[in-house]
Image (spheres, helix red, strand yellow):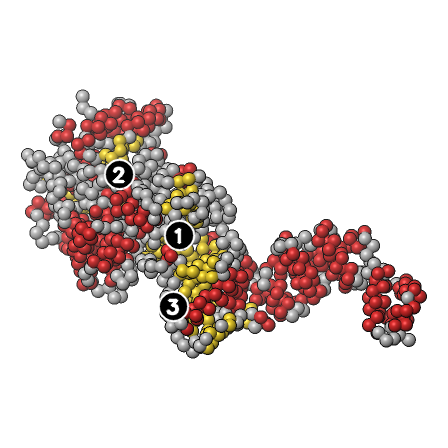
Amino acid sequence: MSVDIDNVKKISKLSKISLSENEIEKFLTDLNQIIGWVDQLTEVDTEKVAPTFSSFGAEEGIKKRSDIISDGGYREDVISNAPKSEEGFFLVPKVID
Amino acid sequence: MVVKMSNLVTGKTGDWEIVIGIEVHAQIISQSKLFSGSSTSFGSEHNTQVSFVDAGMPGMLPVINSVCVEQAVKTGLGLNAKINKFSIFDRKNYFYPDLPQGYQISQFEQPIVGEGKVVIDLEKGVEKEVRIERLHLEQDAGKSMHDQHPSYSYVDLNRSGVALMEIVSMPDMSSAEEAQAYIKKLRNIMKYLQTCDGNMEEGSLRADINVSVRKPGDELGTRCEIKNVNSIKFIGQAIEYEAKRQVDLIEKGEVIKQQTRLFDPKKGQTRSMRSKEEAHDYRYFPDPDLLPLTFTDEFIEGIRKTLPELPDIRRKRLVEDFDLSPYDAGILVSDKETADFFEIASKDSNSKLVCNWIVGELFSTLNKSNKTIQESPVTPENLGKLINLIDDGTITGRIAKDVFEIMIESGDNPVSIVDSNDMRQVSDEGELESIIEKIIQSNPDQVKSLEEKPNLMGWFVGQVMKETQGKANPKSVNELLNKKLLK
Amino acid sequence: MTSLTELCLYEARDGLKNKSFSTKDLILDHIDAMESSRKLNAFITETPEIALKSADLSDDNYANNTNRPLEGLPLGVKDMFCTKGVLTTASSKMLSNFIPPYESTVTDNLWNNGAILLGKLNNDEFTMGSSNETSFFGSVINPWKKNDKQAELVPGGSSGGSAASVAAKVGVGSLGTDTGGSIRQPASFTGTVGLKPTYGRCSRWGIIAFASSLDQAGPITRNVKDNAILLNSMCSHDPKDTTSSLKEIPNFESSLGKSIKGLKVGIPREFFQDGMSDEIIKMWDNGKEWLKNAGAEIIEISLPNTKYALPCYYIIAPAEASSNLARYDGVRFGHSISSNDINEMYELTRSDGFGDEVKRRIMIGTYVLSSGYYDAYYLKAQKVRSLISKDYSEAFNKVDVMLTPSTPNSAFELNEKCDDPLSMYLNDVFTVPINIAGLPAISIPSSKDKVGLPLGLQLIGKPFDEETLYSFANIIEESSNFESLDDKWWLK
């Protein structure tokens, strides 16, 4: 399958990375090359194969936590790297619903 | 155009059916969040219940809360649903300031709970089954405030990461009443199970209502989703408005655009949400930081054993054990605390009378003072005692109302109120006879008029009551008056 | 007087224990070496004050006999590990001002064992790269040079700074991360020993995530013994990381010198590539000989789906990365460009904060997860992943380890490959399948090519069997007599 300009524009929007006209051209070429290369996976017969989503042995199973309050309560640290904050809130440009 | 609070909307071109499906987001009752150890308590100072995991900082990882998992399984069982022994957490990817990781951990194709059903209670004892499609676990988002500053929105992540159960119904509802009954039932079940406190004002229960219309027999119409409606009353208003809006548009020849809308309670209207206008491609994929959730049959049975008695079962039991009508029992169980109150009050008292007093006097009092039954100034034990005083003739029904008023003010028990205020019923025939004689003697004209106006008997009764400060036994008074005056 | 930096990890450890010198002296020499090696651009942030302060504490501990396993030993840490209070950048403009208020579990384990932070090491931006040329802070230069040539070479990537610093003897070891070969490939290019542990051995908590199902932290050192010692302090079960293993952590150092008699070594025929250079073939043959001489049996095996590992990886890793990097939006930390509109803020911040390779991978990742493409790409890749894992688990029924070259070539020149992303990806052909299967693997310097550049042999082990890897690695190291770098041209 080949990647077209609309794909690139859609991806750029979904991933919130804006691209100049030049960049769109360049990424279009790169993406086509890479996607064309990964397309070789279609050669593999995977009809009866179940996907693996983690390389970690399923035997240990999902580990859970008990329901106690063990975190939070350090607002200063959480806000410490915020580019814009005010009175303990994160600030973002006004969002209108 | 007429909109009936019934299942059909009448438009210019005939009758239309409303098709409603509801997605409920219910916050799970737990101490800490779904994937982090931060507190979930409501109303705390902003950003004080936020860990580095909740804030989506670099390198942070989710770890699931075992109690949240149990609560979801419990709720699934309460909805008569299938518990899936294998389920997966997926990432739902999109950008929004209240979503710190840039994705929400949710469940997509393999949720923790599958199909189930709920029986909803409509007017006149009518019941209807609403099917549940699924229930899944997901993270709640933070909150943005848009009115604190002219050019900025303020973001508070306290709520970010709180455990939610998303319960999706099939589009089985066809009116605002049914939708409201569904939400009430769902909320009640979760309150009984103590898996969600159902508090819509605080946002622990939110509903997204999907509404479409069609001519009876037609294919399903395009639906619009009304997001985050947070009161039962607004749900009814939103559905009515939206159904009407859609019928109007279609009858004008326009096409319904699939949209996400918001309900504005001040205007009573729905409007399109600007930010959600573009279709989202959420690119769901299994979260690689979490392994699949698996259950054994023993685990599920273990949870089943801990389930409390659910509303439908409780209603049956109240009908059988307390000799109530299904309708009355239904009113009592529709709120778990009311049913609890009833059972304590009726323990040693006439259950029918108790029920009447709860649904009558008590509810009226609570409504006036805007209190819940948990905040009732009259304890269930004391109500029971009051009913006993009426039942055994110690006080009249009329006096009981006065006693009740005093109980509300003071919180005292009725026996001491009756004693200290000398409110006992006067049943002594001799005493009543002499009072009646006195009245007959003092009012010869009334006695004479009685022949033409038999209703004047009521006046005599009233006089006796006045003389006895309402304490006269009404039955005895009636008998004696009849004997003396109707010769 | 010879600098104390000449001492490797265990030599420095023993020297400190024997009180042959103080921690302070050791640290001062390493700080000096760090400052004099700036031409290599291996460090993004140097932390001499922290190091000296820690040195005092270590000296006290040695005096009171309360010294811990890594007491006083200076280490460089790849700038993907969050270090509390110390700038952590992921070698990206996006985090060029990020000071984490928390410490990663792995580095916390090291500091609790007495190790000392020398500085934060340069790497490919967000670990995306195989040459350390995508860093916002400039490329790292390989301390090795081709015989009589001046050309600057790449150290490999993404853990280029980690490998280069160890090769230059700055720090007695370093921490790297390996998602597709990012420890083993630079180790091979720089003549150092680099191990990627089994997925789940080391906690990922506090390590800036690239591809969550593939990332693993690992040690890069001058020799095998150092590597085993360092790994022991890094591993732990971490309840904050659901994918962290509960398996017991053995003493890795004690597996050195264990006999490999009777054990079987698998040689995967699919790793034999067309056009493979003579030097690599010869090195591989030597490796087989050495292990045979030590009593192991050499067996040819087949891993039929090997050739699909790279394309499989270049679907899965970018997909996970595209999601992991969504948090970099300029709101709560990191680079941020203002705007009146939130979407514009996101776009400006991310377009300006990320370099080209990162953007490329985010876009590939977004594409393969997007509606209409998910089944054909992402789901397909995860199925191929199952097949690759199965190849290895079946082969490991017949053998105990596998032997392959680490890389298809030695270090290339700076700027030689950066215009062709695909050719850059092919560098990882021997290392990537191991990450997909979650297995442990180690690269040991084993020979030099015609122009004097290091080449490494890779050993692949069964899940959680780093011990056998170390036993075998030890044999290879002893047999190869690899001569480490002696020309410190950057000092001139």
Q: Do the residues labelled 2 and 1 touch (CB within 8 Å)?
A: no
The residue carrying mark 3 is: B256
The residue carrying mark 2 is: C78
Within 10 Å of disc 2 (Cα), the crowding (few <14, some 14-19, many 20+) is many
Q: Are marks 3 and 1 in contact (CB under 8 Å)?
A: no
Please name whichever residue, B254 or C235, is drawn nearer the observer in this view of the structure.
Answer: B254
Q: For the residues marked 2 and 3, what is the alpha-carbon distance in whole angstroms?
A: 55 Å
Under mark 3, the amino acid is Ile
Within 10 Å of disc 1 (Cα), the crowding (few <14, some 14-19, many 20+) is few
Q: Quadrant of the N terminus of chain A?
A: bottom left
Q: Are marks 2 and 3 in contact (CB under 8 Å)?
A: no
Residue A47 lies, in percent from the top left, at 25, 66
Under mark 2, the amino acid is Lys
**In which image quadrant can residue C307 be found?**
bottom left
Please name whichever residue, B95 or C369, is drawn nearer the observer in this view of the structure.
Answer: B95
Q: Residue A96 carries which label?
A: 1
